[in-house]
Image (cartoon, rainbow, N blue to C red):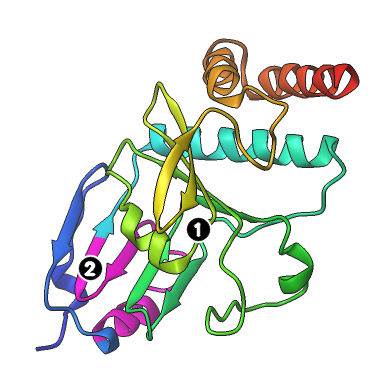
């Protein structure tokens, strides 16, 4: 059975689950829908999830990703942000599109590459997911071997690290051990809703510089 694109209608904030989807059907949909679609698609061993984010979801995604960039910039750490790039592995029967993702310690490995091949290249070092429109499927990231996963539900930032084949919540990020981000990032997100994006980013950058000086 072939999937017909006109059959797929997903409203913002909603998700659609399809079962018994072959790998070839999944790749067909990726190709035909293209990279500039408004939906995100995650695939795991025959189950395909199609989700269309809400504006609130996108706001949080952009702001938290910008905070991560500020941290890395102020720490002088090279990084590469690949947004919602599709990471897929036919061998693992997994395909996933994070809200945002970062190569940090492995940045030099994938520097300049236009395509990432998980049979040869490492997965992202840090992944960001906003759990408003849908709940993050941790198993997908476990199988791909992503070392650090952040989840934000609109109020709470949860940082998880991969240990022994499962994600363990931790209080501080291994990439930013001197920063109480689970406490501070929600505060600056709220500030951005009141004072605007630029004011919140500037205030966050000043805070980061202060922590660096103190440490």
Circle 1 sits in a helix, a strand or a loop, which is it? loop
Q: Is residue 42 above or below residue 71?
A: below
Lower position in the chain sequence, tag 1 or tag 2: 2
Q: Is residue 77 above or below residue 95?
A: above
Q: Is residue 31 magenta?
A: yes
Residue range in magenta is 25-49
Corner quadrant of residue 89: bottom left
Tell me where residue 152 appears, x and y as whole percent.
Answer: 43, 33
The residue depicted at 74 percent of the width and 35 percent of the height is: 71
Please rate how many residues cluster around mark 2, counting C-alpha atoms within 10 Å: few if below 14, some from 14 to 19, many from 20.
Answer: many
Choose between 93 and 60: the one closer to the eye: 93
The residue tagged 1 is 84
Residue 105 showing in the rendered view = yes
The C terminus appears in which quarter of the rendering? top right
Tell me where residue 45 appears, x and y as whole percent.
Answer: 24, 75
Tell me where residue 154 appears, x and y as whole percent.
Answer: 39, 26
Q: Is residue 43 magenta?
A: yes
Q: Is residue 143 shown left or right of residue 111?
A: left
Q: Is residue 144 above or below residue 53?
A: below
Tell me where residue 191 appears, x and y as whole percent.
Answer: 58, 13
Circle 2 sits in a helix, a strand or a loop, which is it? strand
What whole-number distance in Å separates the C-alpha atoms at marks 1 and 2?
16 Å
The residue tagged 2 is 48
């Amino acid at each position: 059975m072939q999937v017909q694109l006109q059959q797929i209608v997903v409203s913002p904030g909603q998700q659609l689950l399809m079962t018994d989807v072959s790998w070839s059907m999944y790749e067909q949909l990726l190709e035909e829908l293209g990279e500039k679609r408004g939906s995100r698609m995650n695939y795991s061993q025959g189950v395909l999830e199609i989700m269309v984010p809400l504006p609130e979801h996108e706001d949080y995604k952009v702001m938290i990703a910008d905070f991560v960039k500020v941290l890395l910039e102020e720490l002088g750490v090279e990084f590469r942000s690949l947004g919602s790039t599709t990471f897929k592995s036919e061998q693992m029967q997994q395909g996933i599109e994070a809200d945002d993702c970062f190569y940090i310690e492995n940045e030099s490995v994938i520097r300049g590459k236009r395509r990432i091949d998980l049979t040869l290249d490492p997965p992202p070092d840090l992944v960001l997911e906003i759990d408003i429109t849908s709940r993050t499927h941790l198993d997908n990231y476990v199988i791909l071997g992503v070392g650090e996963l952040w989840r934000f539900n609109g109020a709470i930032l949860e940082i998880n690290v991969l240990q022994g084949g499962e994600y363990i919540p931790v209080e501080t990020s291994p990439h930013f051990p001197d920063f109480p981000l689970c406490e501070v990032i929600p505060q600056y997100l709220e500030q951005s809703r009141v004072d605007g994006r630029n004011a919140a980013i500037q205030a966050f950058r000043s805070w980061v510089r202060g922590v660096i000086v103190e440490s």
